[in-house]
DNA sequence: CGTATAACCGGATATAATCCGGTGATACTC
DNA sequence: GAGTATCACCGGATTATATCCGGTTATACG
């Protein structure tokens, strides 16, 4: 008898589910009635599916996308960080410190040459200097390199759900 | 007489507006009644403010945040691209080509050479090999370097609206 | 001091979300 | 192959919410 399956109910997503996810990803505040119309369902089964997708964790949350430049975050920079050694002590300390700098909106630990890649959203380059000073002073940081974003060619618009079909 | 001001009505955002933006950024599908409660307003002025924030472009759109790994995008890589020259022909061609690769979810032109930084969401490393082959074959690409994300320490949760107060 | 403007409130109405009973299709059992 | 359980769906009823509107208060400005 397999017990573990009792906990997580596995359900494969059909085409309607994928359409719902794709629609909500782009238009998260659409009414359920309108969503139902788009995916060719009536309101009740549609809301049932949405609820299920939420409960099963496919949808993590909803959010508003704000205009960065208009709200004082028109400058984006990426910073590569190298730490002085690879003990988990140093890593944990750094992670914790970085999480406390709000302008750091992403932090990735990466393989291949350096250790962390940070993405920062800032009002201007003055702010960059201030924040960089904070970052290079963190314990363990021995090297850093900044890439200033000149032009946002494509910004994150969510997962390319249809893309994996073409692989 | 200044004509240009007639087109764009400038309004400074007060504390209530900022609270609305912050709340909607984290909980985009909250009801207007609940939002009003959170920012200490009744329903009607609250929805008026939201509508205005939308029309004035502070809120660009709403969206659902989906679980990447559960939907077949558990692998994230950054790819740094160098192009062979700086003519706008080459740039435009590259940008256009990159926009047509759906797994490329972000593309930034960065300072310091002829570089682009791409962020890709993929199901696995097999897919990475397939897509990388497509990218390096694009006209003008002479150098590339990949950073594979080992651990997502902090993922993008929107703009740190309160952060600029501390600068 | 008077007036214009802006933001707010609360109630009325329109719209949407949610609930619920019933139906048809599918798959599984005997 | 008949019976039964399960699932997804529909449409109507109910509850909740969004939206509209008139009236009130506060503030800025002449």
Image (spheres, coloured by chain):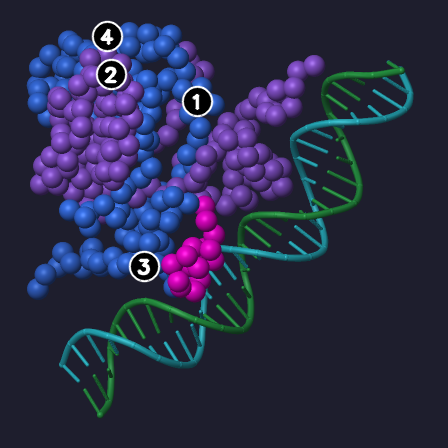
Chain colours: A purple, B blue, C green, D cyan
Instruction: Determine the CA span between mark 3 and mark 4.
Output: 51 Å
Residue that numbered label 1 is attached to: B69
**Residue displayed at 46% across by 49% down:** B30
Question: Is B105 placed left or right of B108 in the picture?
Answer: right
Q: Chain of mark 1?
A: B
Does label 1 or label 4 sit earlier along the sequence?
Answer: 1
Q: Chain of mark 4?
A: B
Say which element carries label 4. Answer: loop
Dot 1 and dot 3 within a common chain: yes
Q: Position of residue A38 (x, y in %)?
A: 52, 36
Does label 1 or label 3 sit earlier along the sequence?
Answer: 3
Say which element carries label 3. Answer: helix
* Magenta-highlighted residues: B29-43
Q: Chain of mark 2?
A: A
Instruction: Determine the CA span between mark 2 and mark 4.
Output: 36 Å
Image mark count: 4
Look at discs 2 and 4 and give the one toward the viewer.
2
Q: Position of residue C5 (x, y in %)?
A: 25, 72
Instruction: Determine the CA span between mark 1 and mark 4.
Output: 28 Å
Q: Chain of mark 3?
A: B
Question: Above or below — where is A140 with respect to C20?
Answer: above
Q: Tags 2 and 4 in contact by the CB under 8 Å rule?
A: no
Task: Confirm whether residue A106 shows in the render.
Answer: no
Residue that numbered label 3 is attached to: B16
Look at discs 3 and 2 and give the one toward the viewer.
2
Dot 3 and dot 2 within a common chain: no
Residue that numbered label 2 is attached to: A86
Quadrant of the rendered structure where residue B111 is? Answer: top left
Instruction: Determine the CA span between mark 1 and mark 2.
Output: 27 Å
Question: Is A93 placed left or right of B122 in the picture?
Answer: left
């Amino acid at each position: 008898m397999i017990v573990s399956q009792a906990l997580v109910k596995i359900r494969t997503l059909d085409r309607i589910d994928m359409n719902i996810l794709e629609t909500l990803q782009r238009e998260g505040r659409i009414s359920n009635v309108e969503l139902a119309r788009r995916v060719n369902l009536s309101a009740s089964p549609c809301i049932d599916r949405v609820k299920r997708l939420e409960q099963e964790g496919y949808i993590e949350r909803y959010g508003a996308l704000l205009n960065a430049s208009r709200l004082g975050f028109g400058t984006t920079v990426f910073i590569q960080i190298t730490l002085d050694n690879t003990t988990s002590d140093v890593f944990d300390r750094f992670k914790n410190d970085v999480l406390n700098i709000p302008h750091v909106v992403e932090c990735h630990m990466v393989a291949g040459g350096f250790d962390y890649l940070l993405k920062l959203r800032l009002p201007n380059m003055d702010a960059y200097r201030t924040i960089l000073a904070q970052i290079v002073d963190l314990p363990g940081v021995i090297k850093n390199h900044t890439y200033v974003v000149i032009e946002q060619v494509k910004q994150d618009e969510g997962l390319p759900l249809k893309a994996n079909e073409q692989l």
